[in-house]
Image (spheres, rainbow, N blue to C red):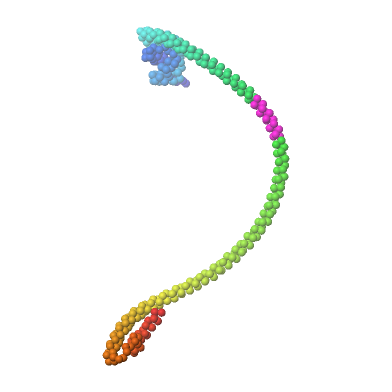
């Protein structure tokens, strides 16, 4: 069941004519045209003006009203619900719009004349371009003729190359036969090489096992030698430790001997000082004796300078410290 229409066609017609009248009054009384009608009145504007309505129904009503208004004009359209005075004023406005439309028609005629002149100029330009294209076409035809000649030459070259290709194919067949023979020879050679390689590989395996055995023997001998050298190193370390102990003991004895030598040297220096003092004393005594002997025996000759060394008094003190010096020298050694 169809839904009842919320708005009647009369309301739609009245609203559309009112919108057109408002547009005529606001925009210098321009005549109604399809473009102007669609610009002033649309389904969206009409629905907003009415506040409700089915867009499909409104569109159909607008199409009917547009055909009537555009075809007959507002002067022939009866506007229901309007007073006669207002309708008369609207007709006067429509006549003024028609006069303005005539001015627009004249202006459009001038524009059409200018467009025709521009079209004639464009046609002349097109004729010139056509002539130029004809000249280019003649040149292209000449180039095409040259290319045809070149193509004929290329075809002749192609026939000669085809003959050469046949010759090369025959040579290729011969080379293929030679290649097959070489391939068969290569296969035989590879088989021979494979057999030789298998022989060499077997020999290599035997040599490898022998080398592993010899390596194992050498490793065992090396291990034994290493153990022997480890024992010798241990013994050498023990001997070195013993020699280090002997060296420390000898160094200790040498230090004690050095101390004894220093003490003996000090004693020898003291004895040397004592001996020097005793020698000086002996020389003084000897001089006194000499003076006394010269007084008693004036006729006796003066003894030689070295004779006092053989006297008991001179030789005895000098020989006394000899054992101590010898002991000191022995300790120094």
Q: Along the line of sight, which residue is nearer the eye, 211 or 81?
A: 211
Name the quadrant of the C terminus: bottom left
Residue drawn 60% across and 63% down?
Answer: 215
Q: Is residue 94 visible?
A: no
Q: Residue 154 magenta-drawn?
A: yes
Dividing the picture into quadrants, the one containing residue 315 is bottom left
Q: Is residue 235 above or below residue 73?
A: below
Q: Position of residue 115 (x, y in %)?
A: 47, 13
Q: Along the line of sight, which residue is nearer the eye, 311 or 85?
A: 311
Q: Is residue 157 above or below residue 127?
A: below
Q: Along the line of sight, which residue is nearer the eye, 45 or 163?
A: 163
Q: Is residue 14 above or below residue 174?
A: above
Q: Is residue 5 above or below residue 158?
A: above
Dividing the picture into quadrants, the one containing residue 164 is top right
Q: Position of residue 331 (x, y in %)?
A: 39, 81
Residue drawn 35% across and 86% down?
Answer: 306
Residue span colored magenta? 149-166
Residue drawn 52% across and 14% down?
Answer: 124
Characterize the magenta stretch by its predominant secondary structure. Answer: helix
Residue drawn 56% across and 66% down?
Answer: 222
Dividing the picture into quadrants, the one containing residue 96 is top left
Q: Position of residue 8 (x, y in %)?
A: 42, 16
Q: Along the line of sight, which residue is nearer the eye, 15 or 114?
A: 114
Q: Residue 323 magenta-drawn?
A: no
Q: Position of residue 226 (x, y in %)?
A: 54, 68
Give the total of numbered labels.
0
């Amino acid at each position: 069941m169809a839904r009842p229409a919320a708005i009647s066609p009369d309301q739609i017609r009245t609203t559309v004519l009112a919108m057109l009248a408002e547009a005529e009054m606001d925009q210098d009384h321009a005549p109604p045209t399809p473009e102007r009608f669609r610009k002033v009145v649309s389904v969206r504007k009409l629905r907003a003006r009415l506040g409700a309505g089915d867009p499909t129904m409104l569109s159909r009503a607008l199409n009917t009203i547009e055909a009537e208004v555009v075809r007959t004009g507002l002067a022939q359209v009866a506007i229901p619900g309007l007073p006669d005075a207002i309708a008369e004023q609207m007709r006067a406005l429509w006549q003024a719009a028609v006069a303005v439309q005539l001015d627009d028609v004249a202006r459009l005629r001038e524009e059409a004349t200018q467009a025709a002149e521009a079209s004639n100029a464009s046609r002349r330009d097109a004729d010139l371009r056509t002539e130029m294209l004809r000249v280019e076409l003649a040149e292209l035809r000449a180039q095409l003729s040259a290319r045809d000649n070149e193509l004929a030459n290329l075809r002749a070259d192609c026939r000669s190359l085809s003959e050469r290709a046949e010759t090369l194919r025959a040579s290729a067949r011969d080379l293929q036969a030679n290649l097959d023979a070489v391939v068969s020879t290569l296969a035989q050679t590879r088989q021979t090489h494979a057999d030789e390689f298998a022989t060499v590989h077997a020999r290599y395996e035997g040599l490898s096992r022998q080398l592993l055995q010899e390596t194992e023997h050498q490793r065992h001998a090396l291990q034994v030698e290493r153990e022997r050298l480890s024992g010798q190193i241990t013994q050498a370390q023990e001997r070195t430790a013993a020699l280090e102990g002997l060296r420390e003991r000898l160094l200790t004895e040498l230090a004690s001997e050095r101390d004894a030598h220093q003490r003996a040297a000090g004693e020898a220096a003291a004895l040397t000082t004592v001996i020097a003092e005793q020698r000086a004393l002996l020389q003084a005594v000897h001089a006194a004796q000499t003076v006394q002997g010269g007084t008693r025996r004036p006729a006796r000759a003066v003894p030689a300078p070295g004779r006092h060394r053989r006297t008991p008094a001179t030789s005895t003190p000098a020989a006394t410290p000899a054992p101590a010096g010898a002991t000191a020298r022995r300790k120094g050694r």
